Amino acid sequence: MIKIGFVGVGDISGIYLKNITGLFGEIEIAGICDLVREKAERAAEKYNIKKIYKDMYELFADPEVDIVLNITRPYEHFGVSKAALEAGKNVYSEKPLAATLEEGRILKKLADEKGLFLGGAPDTFLGAGIQTCRRLIDDGYIGTPVGAAAFMICRGHESWHPDPEFYYKHGGGPMFDMGPYYLTALVNLLGPVESVMGMSKISYPERMITSERLNGTIIKVDVPTYITGILKFRSGAVGTIFTTFDVKYTEGARLEVYGSKGTLNVPDPNGFGGPVKLLRMEEKEYRDMPLCFSYSENSRALGLADMAKAIETGRRFRANSRQTLHVLEIMSAIDTSSKEGRLVKIESDYEPEAPMANPDRIGYLD
């Protein structure tokens, strides 16, 4: 049994706690810690967790912890992951890998030098929806992929999130917050990105929080909130990605892959399930495709369970640092292109890992 130590017990931690204790049978929680101890105490009581560490360094020193799960805020990812790796722990981090490309490269180099596993979210690409899309593309249902388009459109978080300021600060913004879902899906379906161009802006320099706890608080926006990127894949396909926190829109997520023989509507990459829709050249309407893999419900921690299985068996794991660094470099390059007005080459080495295999039992990986 591979044991997980939680650093951070914020909003996203609930689904990890639920799935590790109730879904995945090959991992368990060694203990948790949070800067706000009351959060850790509530989680420990709800999920029957035995250990609450006074801080992350006590967690890192625990020989029972095999993997540190880093679910702190984006700008804290680097510091926590670096300290965990230096302590000799494998690390699985929430997205993004780090707030800057330089930080991401430091983390990967450190993990490689120490022979440790490093990777992280998103793991939604391992779910039934996107894995079904990968099978359809790999099996030639849309012919040769020629392009793709991804859209994440919303009006921001200040009307509903209890503490939304970090979405508009270093490490935040719609590209670094939501881009990893779309870009991870795209590179798994179409392969590595070769170069990018981008344009971006801050539409509203200040925002007012209207959610209950901090209602009336003004946020100063430090990062672009309207971002468009053009992606040249190594395969020759060309894609676009548009992310924004500035626009009122009824259907905020869309992802499409275009091929020589048809078009594939990929499900929202923020989720694990469908629908998957296919339009072939000889047909007049999209048709729903059956999901041919497991994990269609909210299965966060699937990537973590896959890392644990890789540690146990010695095989490669899918949500690894090659992938998370490649995605981080793409996002950083879009920002660089926007600032400098030029094409930016992608340097990181990446190839998609093996597709998922259907398990004999849900919660136990191949």
Image (cartoon, rainbow, N blue to C red):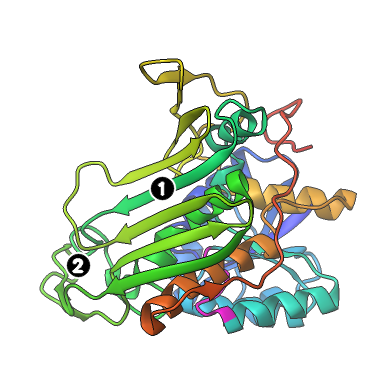
Which residue extends farthest right? 314
Q: Is residue 55 in view?
A: no
Q: Which residue is mark 2?
A: 213
Q: Residue at 59% of width from left, 44% of height from top?
A: 189
Along the line of sight, which residue is nearer the eye, 264 or 64? Answer: 264
Along the line of sight, which residue is nearer the eye, 135 or 314? Answer: 135
The circle on residue 149 is 1
Q: Quadrant of residue 223?
A: bottom left
The kind of secondary structure the magenta stretch mainly shows is loop
Whether 40 is drawn above or below 354: the answer is: below
Residue 184 screen position, x and y as percent: 55, 53
Along the line of sight, which residue is nearer the eye, 132 or 338? Answer: 338
Q: Nearer the viewer, mark 1 or mark 2?
A: 1
Does the magenta run of residues contain 11?
no
**Is 107 situated left or right of 35 in this image?**
right
Give the structural element (helix, strand or loop) at label 1: strand
Task: Give the amino acid at mark 1.
Answer: Ala
What is the total number of numbered labels drawn onto the structure image? 2
**Is 172 situated left or right of 318 in this image?**
left
Residue 169 screen position, x and y as percent: 34, 79
Give the structural element (helix, strand or loop) at label 2: loop
Q: Residue at 28% of width from left, 46% of height from top?
A: 252
Q: Which stretch did the figure color magenta?
A: 95-101
**What distance separates the C-alpha of mark 1 from that of mark 2?**
37 Å
Which residue extends farthest left? 216
Residue 319 screen position, x and y as percent: 66, 54
Q: Residue at 20% of width from left, 42% of height from top?
A: 250
